[in-house]
Amino acid sequence: MMKIKNLLISALTLVVTGLTTPQLLAAENWSFGVLSQRSPVLTAQYWNPILDYVERKTGVKLVLKVARTAPESNEATEMGLFDFVYSNTIFLPKMAQANYQVILRPRDEAITGQIVTLTDSSIQTLKELDGKEVGFPSLAAFVGYAVPMDQILRQNIQVIPVFGGNQEGIIAQLKAGKVVAAGVNNQVMKAYAQREGMSYRVLWESHGFNNLPISVHPRVPKKLADSIKNAIDAMDGDPEGIQILESTAALIGQKPPYGFRAASASDYASYVDFYRQTLVKDIK
């Protein structure tokens, strides 16, 4: 417990700025955890303007917290250390005690798990990965590890897993030729490749899953949680809000539609079904 608390203190912590009215100065801080996928700097550049907007609309100060790696983020989430969290790992069976409740889902297209290789690679099929080093973000990555590894196991392929800490970390290793293929989130992969001029080929792709939800811990008062939900839900209908969504989306190569919509656990039933049936046993 102390280790994770120290981690969250030492991890990138960005307090959104905004109006300095007495109401805001008196407001209690609420943590907003984000699953580690991209670099801390890029994560901050994406989320800070959104959280700043929410603060100015609601008077609620949110503090962005990003752990160094996805497993560390998951450990903090499992312990219920975040008040709000942007993560799709809350559906892991071990997360049940934390009891995070889905309140919002992204409006953009579903995410998929992919197994990719470089365009000039000699690897053409999954079977050719047998006995080779294949990269993954971490044991905590859903579409980057659990989903592609499940497919690998179902095809009786034996690979040597190599982990990169987060999505962009393992993609960088693939680009550098340190692994012959990698399990990735299709959206993160596409955006990274466009940004870095990287050419890749998809060996396998899963069906779609709704993108990462925003969820709230039960200790957060319902009235406060609803104010956050409503403010984010309405962003794409507000001139200021849509401008922020468009500018932050440009940073990560996100395509429209932008923003979030109110959601519930039923929108993520496919995650629960996957965890119930998966052959992967070492998900963190």
Image: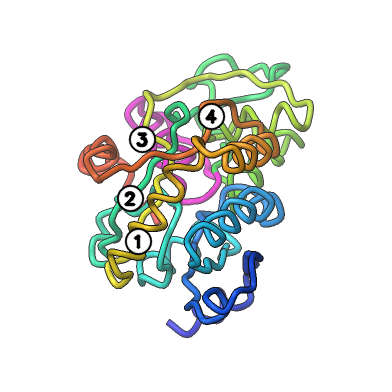
Disc 4 designates what residue? 186
Indicate the position of residue 93 as horizontal and vertical percent values.
Answer: 25, 55
Please, what secondary structure does the residue beneath circle 1 have? helix
Q: What is the distance, in whole Å, between disc 2 and disc 4 at their CAs? A: 24 Å
Task: Give above or below for 63 relative to 262.
Answer: below
Please, what secondary structure does the residue beneath circle 4 have? helix
Q: Which mark is drawn over residue 103?
A: 2
User: Residue drawn 60% across and 74% down?
Assistant: 21
Disc 3 designates what residue? 150
Whether residue 147 sits left or right of residue 266 in the image: it is: right
Magenta segment: 137-161
Disc 2 vs disc 4: which is toward the camera?
2
Indicate the position of residue 19 as horizontal and vertical percent values.
Answer: 64, 67
- Considering only order in the chain, which callout, 4 or 3, is on the residue closer to the N terminus? 3
Assess disc 4: are there few (<14), some (14-19) or many (≥20) residues with their C-alpha within 10 Å of its C-alpha. Answer: many
In the picture, the quarter occupied by the N terminus is bottom left
Q: Is residue 243 magenta?
A: no
User: Residue drawn 30% across and 64% down?
Assistant: 223
Disc 3 vs disc 4: which is toward the camera?
4
- Considering only order in the chain, which callout, 4 or 1, is on the residue closer to the N terminus? 4
- Considering only order in the chain, which callout, 1 or 3, is on the residue closer to the N terminus? 3
Disc 1 designates what residue? 225
Q: In the orientation shown, which residue stands out farthest toward the bottom?
A: 2
Q: What is the distance, in whole Å, between disc 3 and disc 4 at their CAs? A: 16 Å
Please, what secondary structure does the residue beneath circle 2 have? strand
* Residues at discs 2 and 1 in contact (Cβ within 8 Å): yes
Q: Which mark is drawn over residue 115?
A: none
- Considering only order in the chain, which callout, 2 or 3, is on the residue closer to the N terminus? 2
User: Residue drawn 28% across and 56% down?
Assistant: 101
- Tell me which amino acid carries mark 1: Ala
- Tell me which amino acid carries mark 3: Asp
